Amino acid sequence: MTPTDPRPIAVLGGTGPAGMGLALRWARAGEIIIIGSRDARRAEDTADRIKLKAGNQAKVSGMENSAACAAADLLVLTVPFEGQAALIKQLKPAMRPGSILIDATVPLATAVGGRASRTLGVWQGSASQQAAELVPTGVAAVAAFHNLSAELLNGDGLLDCDVIVCGDDAHANQLTRTLAAKIPGVRAIDGGKLENARILEQITALLIGLNIRHKGHGGIRITGLPPEAYL
Amino acid sequence: MTPTDPRPIAVLGGTGPAGMGLALRWARAGEIIIIGSRDARRAEDTADRIKLKAGNQAKVSGMENSAACAAADLLVLTVPFEGQAALIKQLKPAMRPGSILIDATVPLATAVGGRASRTLGVWQGSASQQAAELVPTGVAAVAAFHNLSAELLNGDGLLDCDVIVCGDDAHANQLTRTLAAKIPGVRAIDGGKLENARILEQITALLIGLNIRHKGHGGIRITGLPPEAYL
């Protein structure tokens, strides 16, 4: 693979609305996308639906999660919190050293039958730190993409939202910001260490509450930083 | 007091940068401001400095905290977390039923010698819920103004930040939003119940981390809500 070849992005749990929306936007930007799902057939169907929207040149395929994971080294996790730990454990043998796991999991209380506007406490501090603890050595965990509206991602318009990226590996963090900035309208911001992911996860719960209360598709913009802070 | 008389606003702990900045903006908007401080003399000095910036018609005076509290029924608390509980306990006898306590306290880890980009867990869920537990019956606690840059508040420019207001009392919540919207550039948003204050408090820690990392004066805007969600 030459440096100019785009690396494939596996969107694991990619048949849900958030995964589909990210895949669609990246496919439109020319990225090679592999949709991962428990069910290979369902992954292929979703890939076809994304191609229909993204255009025929779009490079989108579907595979069972482990196969998708083995075929990529950019791994994006968009699953409900209740499935996160089990999926990472299952995928662990398929993860290659040097891979990056981009985690967008939000520990919503819905995982235990509670409200989507509330979160659960996670022992490690955040769902993304739980992910970091579960991946094999040599795989960097990054937290991002929590606060993008799945509904807007699946549309055609510009997103009006910033993506704050948190992670302890500078290279993985930067690569994730590059991916974020490929979504039209999104600005990517380095949010520092992975431990800050807990706040990104909380913000999703706040936005869900605002969406319910005000009937919208809330996002956030960070104001007041110098231009070089935004990618 | 007729309905058209503005109610005085006591900014308790008003000699710090956040309190001064809010007082300045409200004084410019014609509100009657009482700066509260442990030291009446220091409160008066701060009031004079605010008047110098806000113009001579500005109605700003300074009093010891308990006297300020007794003279107003809109109470704004802008103190470091380590002083919050003790101050509310001290002020309790001076609080009149029907008053509104607007709490902007953030439980930063600096309270115990930690970092300003990290928060402490508060048993009640948030500093504002701790405040709600401490005020006398008949006083409504509201959480707001956590995420405004003190430096920008003390300047002359428009703020580029939304104020999310959380509180269980609909009237107090609405009145606080009206106050927020008097700060030029600020849009006020109903953020629902007081329990959501924990997320507003966390966002401040995130913004402080971003300010350190990117050398800015971060704020947030909520995007994607219908126009009627913003005041």
Image: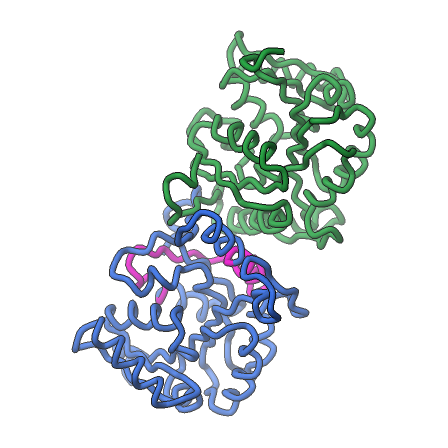
Chain colours: A blue, B green
Considering every residue shown, the one lying at the far top of the view is B56
Q: Nearer the viewer, residue B165 or A134?
A: B165
Q: Which quarter of the image is occupied by the C terminus of chain B?
A: top left
Question: Is residue A197 found inside the magenta-colored segment of the image?
Answer: yes
Where A194 falls versus A43 (above or below)? Answer: above
Residue A223 located left or right of residue B172: left
Where A157 falls versus A131 (above or below)? Answer: above
Q: Which quarter of the image is occupied by the N terminus of chain B?
A: top right
State which quadrant residue A112 falls in. bottom right
Q: Position of residue B211 (x, y in %)?
A: 52, 46
Residue B229 located left or right of residue B205: left
State which quadrant residue B11 falls in. top right
> At x 41% / y 65%, what residue is drawn?
A174
Residue A214 located left or right of residue B62: left
Where B29 falls versus A194 (above or below)? Answer: above
Question: Is residue B182 found inside the magenta-colored segment of the image?
Answer: no
Q: Which residues are magenta?
A: A179-204
> At x 70% / y 38%, what residue is drawn?
B80
Q: How many marks?
A: 0
Q: Position of residue A209 (x, y in %)?
A: 51, 53
> At x 31% / y 62%, what residue is drawn?
A183
Q: Position of residue B21 (x, y in %)?
A: 56, 27
Q: Nearer the viewer, residue A207 or A35?
A: A207
Q: Nearer the viewer, residue A30 or A120?
A: A120
Q: Position of residue A58 (x, y in %)?
A: 21, 76
